[in-house]
Image: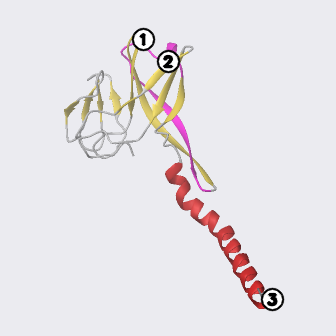
Amino acid sequence: MGRRAFVGYAAAAMGAFLGAFLATPIVGSFVSPALKKATPGHWKNLGTVGKFQIGTPKSERVSLIKKDGWVTDVATRLVWVVRLADNDYVVYNAQCTHLGCLVEWHPEDKAFKSPCHGGVFKMDDGIVLAGPPPRPLDALEHKIEKGELWVNYQDFRLGVGEKVPI
């Protein structure tokens, strides 16, 4: 092998190495989101179970930390906690399933009402009593650990009949 051929092969090898070195982060940025395990929802502590009274819904704020690249944003969401019996709870996403208005508790009617389009929901199971909402209030997964109520907060697609996580 002559000197000219050796230099040509060496230059090609260096170019291939440099190309692979530069392409790795670019390819990784496209592939890594597909390899990440999806973690639906955010487990948040709502406080001690004793602060919730049977038959009286209580609203609670949930702070979510959302990361997008280098930007970190804190979003506040609202949930309704309904204690039906001693150890029987239901936690609702406070958004109306029609267009996302925040539902309000009306004790005189024992119902949640949407201020936007007249949606009315039952307290104990979230079923639609009146108005245009296409499905009941979205009940959220929850658990009790060491006397604390935890909720797995999620948002769902609005205006559709199925409960589809976003």
Q: Amino acid at mark 3?
A: Arg
The correct choice, above or below, for 77 with respect to 55 in the image is below
Front one among 9 and 132: 9
Q: Amino acid at mark 1?
A: Asn
Q: Looking at the image, which residue is at 73% across and 76% down? A: 14
Of helix, strand and loop, which one carries label 1? Answer: loop
Q: Amino acid at mark 2?
A: Ile
Front one among 132 and 109: 132
State how far apart marks 3 and 1 are (Cα).
83 Å
Identify residue for label 1.
87
Front one among 33 and 101: 33
Say the numbered circle drawn on residue 3: 3
State how far apart marks 2 and 3 are (Cα).
75 Å
Specify few, some or many for label 2: CA neighbours under 10 Å numbering under 14, 14-19, or 20 or more. some
Of helix, strand and loop, which one carries label 2? Answer: strand
Residues shaded magenta:
47-69
Quarter of image, res 103? top left
Say the numbered circle drawn on residue 146: none
Identify residue for label 2.
144
The correct choice, above or below, for 119 with respect to 18 in the image is above
Specify few, some or many for label 3: CA neighbours under 10 Å numbering under 14, 14-19, or 20 or more. few
Residue 131 at x, y = what percent?
19, 38
State how far apart marks 1 and 2 are (Cα).
9 Å
